[in-house]
Image: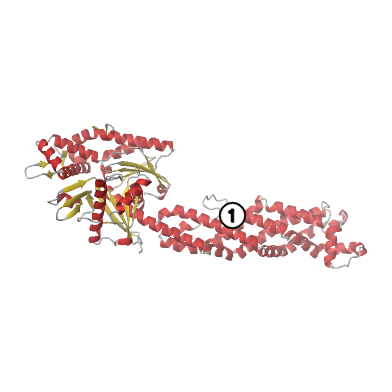
């Protein structure tokens, strides 16, 4: 069955959220609801009649006898942990299906997040555990990748920053993860034992509230016998904390408090409360879980360590992207900005951290599928022989574009200087002239000027003939995946004077063409044809009239072919006669007259040498494939 939607499942230590993205759409993901809410406390409760309940319902439903909260952790073999995770996910999945918010079955592909510090084996084990919940298709990916994708697709990251270095700081309930994204690759910054989570603050509020409670002893007994009451009271502490950090300015007064509330029974209430003074005390008190550092100091140390590790890599992040529910704590923004100051590094806290990861996971899933389909479309172009066909179709035009400038260059740089040398008696026979012309032709064809001429013609041929046909193949792919047509075009041409590290086609064409033309001109007989043209049109019969008797005496039949051969190989015309046979004006006239013939000879020989052009076609095709593959890698991030 075709995958219709990707589901971003953000199973957090503190909260859980789910989002859905339609694969064939670029619209933002839609948040899904459980119990009519888009975010749920990560809680699993058991009710004797109603069965398993999740989120708020598990907290408020009367008669719940078992309650578990904040149970996300690195996968392990603890049977209770495994059962809790599997049951929670299975219940969530069932509720989403029952509410018709999912296509269901193989039409829905789940992407579930995990901390970026988890190893590949951790992810695989977690994925295996989640599959036990009955979800047919799922993948576990780092939450940092989801945060990056959400920022990118929500328009918070410009293209240059997508390709630069982005430090993602994910402050969650149980951990704080630092991930460097460089050139679209994720690099977790490992701190070993990572226990820096916001739930430590919840527990500190709980401990202070319990310690100051009038019925402390009774509460301790209740919590021991009925753990679900303690879980509810801890959540009340969490709500007080969230209220405080959402409205800090309201609680700077010593008489104002952010409060939570939980009723144990009609006589016993648990009411945690915090204000600025109390929160500062909590944030600055040492915690055993943090090696007896305070929360603030531990966070500052982590930032410092992250910066030091980046400095060793000689990296200054262009952007610090903050996410995770606890990133709403304003002091974390201040500390991040102190450690990574502007203007070198910009700070971007996510405005909706509680939804960021779920939305990002759904986007990651859609992007993965669409990116794979995009690559497949380009690969189809590679395997269809269409590239080879369009190159092959325009080879005659390449030959035609090369013949005139090549003929002009050979006449100016080889033929004319060679004839001048023969005229001045620097060359003995016309056979020697042929040898000299071969040397001059080869020397010129390898010169910088000749290479420039050949390369210019090849570049012009590619830009005017190949590129339009290639665009006709790649533009529909770009339209299908809604990315700019320029993404797969070579708009900057292939002129080697233009530095373009992605495009080596010009070099491929040039290297093959120069070597090929040298071979055609020298080994293919073009120079010999020049000598024949000279003899045929200008020198044979004047020389034969002077040397006719000796030629006849040699017993040779006087026909054009034999006379030409004898003159070419044997006759050394005296120097005083050469200027009469071949004056400067005759050389100019001869060069002008033989130019069309030389172009014709070059075109015929180039066309006839199919084997060499077959090699050229293959080389250009390979160059195109390589260059297109590079473009695919650079533009794939633009897919939504």
Helix, strand or loop at mark 1? helix
Residue beneath disc 1: 508
In terms of depth relative to the viewer, which is nearer, 169 or 164?
A: 169
Residue 346, image quadrant: top left
Residue occupying the point 19% across, 53% down: 53
In the rendered view, would you say 402 is above or below 255?
below
Q: Is residue 401 visible?
A: no
In the image, farthest residue toward the left: 267
Q: Is residue 606 left or right of residue 537?
A: left
Query: Where is residue 530 shown, x and y percent of the image?
Result: 75, 61
Residue 543, image quadrant: bottom right
Query: Where is residue 101 shown, x and y percent of the image?
Result: 26, 60
In the rendered view, would you say 171 is above or below 297?
below
For the C terminus, give its image quadrant: bottom left
Query: Where is residue 85 shown, x and y percent of the image?
Result: 26, 49
Q: Is residue 235 visible?
A: yes
Q: Is residue 185 left or right of residue 397?
A: left
> Callout 1: 10 Å neighbours few (<14), some, many (20+)?
some
């Amino acid at each position: 069955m075709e995958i219709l939607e990707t589901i971003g499942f953000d199973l957090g230590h503190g909260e859980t959220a789910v989002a859905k993205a339609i694969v064939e759409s670029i619209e933002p993901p839609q948040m899904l609801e459980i119990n009519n809410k888009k975010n749920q406390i990560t809680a699993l409760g058991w009710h004797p009649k109603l069965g398993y309940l999740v989120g708020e319902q598990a907290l408020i439903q009367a008669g719940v006898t078992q309650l578990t909260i904040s149970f996300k952790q690195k996968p392990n073999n603890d049977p209770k942990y495994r059962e809790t995770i599997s049951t929670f996910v299975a219940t969530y999945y069932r509720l989403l299906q029952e509410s018709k918010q999912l296509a269901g079955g193989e039409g829905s592909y789940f992407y579930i997040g995990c901390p970026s510090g988890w190893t590949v084996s951790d992810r695989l084990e977690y994925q295996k555990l989640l599959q036990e919940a009955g979800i047919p298709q799922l993948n576990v990916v780092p939450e940092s990748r989801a945060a990056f994708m959400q920022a990118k697709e929500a328009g918070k990251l410009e293209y240059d920053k997508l390709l630069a270095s982005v430090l993602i700081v994910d402050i969650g309930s149980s951990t704080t993860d630092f991930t460097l994204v460089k050139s679209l690759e994720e690099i977790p910054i490992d701190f070993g034992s990572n226990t820096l989570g916001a739930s430590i603050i919840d527990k500190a509020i709980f401990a202070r509230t319990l310690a100051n409670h009038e019925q402390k002893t009774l509460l301790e007994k209740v919590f021991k016998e009925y753990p679900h009451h303690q879980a509810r009271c801890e959540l009340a502490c969490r709500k007080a904390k969230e209220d405080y950090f959402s409205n800090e300015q309201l609680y700077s007064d010593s008489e104002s408090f952010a409060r939570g509330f939980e009723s144990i029974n009609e006589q016993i209430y648990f009411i945690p409360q915090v204000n600025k003074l109390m929160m500062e005390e909590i944030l600055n008190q040492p915690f055993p879980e943090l090696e007896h550092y305070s929360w603030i100091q531990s966070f500052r140390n982590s930032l410092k360590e992250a910066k030091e590790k980046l400095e060793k890599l000689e990296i200054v992040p262009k952007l610090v992207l903050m996410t995770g529910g606890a990133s709403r704590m304003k002091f974390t923004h201040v500390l991040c900005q102190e450690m990574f100051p502007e203007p070198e590094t910009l700070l971007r806290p996510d405005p909706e951290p509680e939804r960021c990861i779920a939305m990002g996971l759904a986007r990651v899933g859609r992007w993965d599928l669409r990116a794979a389909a995009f690559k497949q479309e380009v690969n189809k172009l590679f395997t269809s022989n269409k590239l080879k066909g369009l190159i092959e179709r325009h080879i005659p035009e390449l030959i035609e574009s090369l013949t005139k400038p090549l003929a002009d260059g050979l006449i100016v740089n080889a033929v004319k200087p060679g004839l001048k040398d023969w005229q001045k008696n620097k060359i003995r026979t016309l056979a020697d002239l042929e040898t000299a012309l071969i040397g001059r032709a080869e020397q010129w064809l390898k010169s910088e000027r000749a290479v420039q001429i050949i390369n210019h013609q090849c570049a012009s041929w590619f830009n005017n003939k190949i590129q339009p046909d290639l665009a006709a193949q790649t533009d529909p792919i770009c339209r299908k995946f809604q990315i700019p047509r320029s993404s797969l075009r070579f708009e900057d041409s292939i002129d080697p004077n233009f530095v373009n590290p992605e495009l080596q086609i010009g070099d491929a064409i040039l290297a093959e063409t120069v070597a090929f033309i040298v071979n055609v001109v020298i080994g293919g007989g073009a120079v010999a044809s020049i000598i024949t043209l000279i003899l045929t049109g200008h020198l044979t019969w004047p020389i034969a009239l002077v040397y006719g008797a000796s030629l006849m005496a040699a017993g040779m039949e006087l026909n054009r072919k034999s006379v030409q051969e004898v003159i070419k190989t044997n006759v050394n015309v005296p120097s005083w006669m050469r200027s009469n046979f071949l004056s400067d004006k005759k050389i100019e006239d001869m060069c002008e007259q033989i130019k069309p013939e030389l172009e014709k000879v070059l075109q015929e020989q180039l066309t006839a040498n199919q084997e060499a052009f077959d090699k050229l076609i293959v080389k250009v095709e390979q160059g195109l494939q390589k260059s297109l593959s590079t473009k695919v890698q650079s533009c794939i991030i633009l897919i939504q």
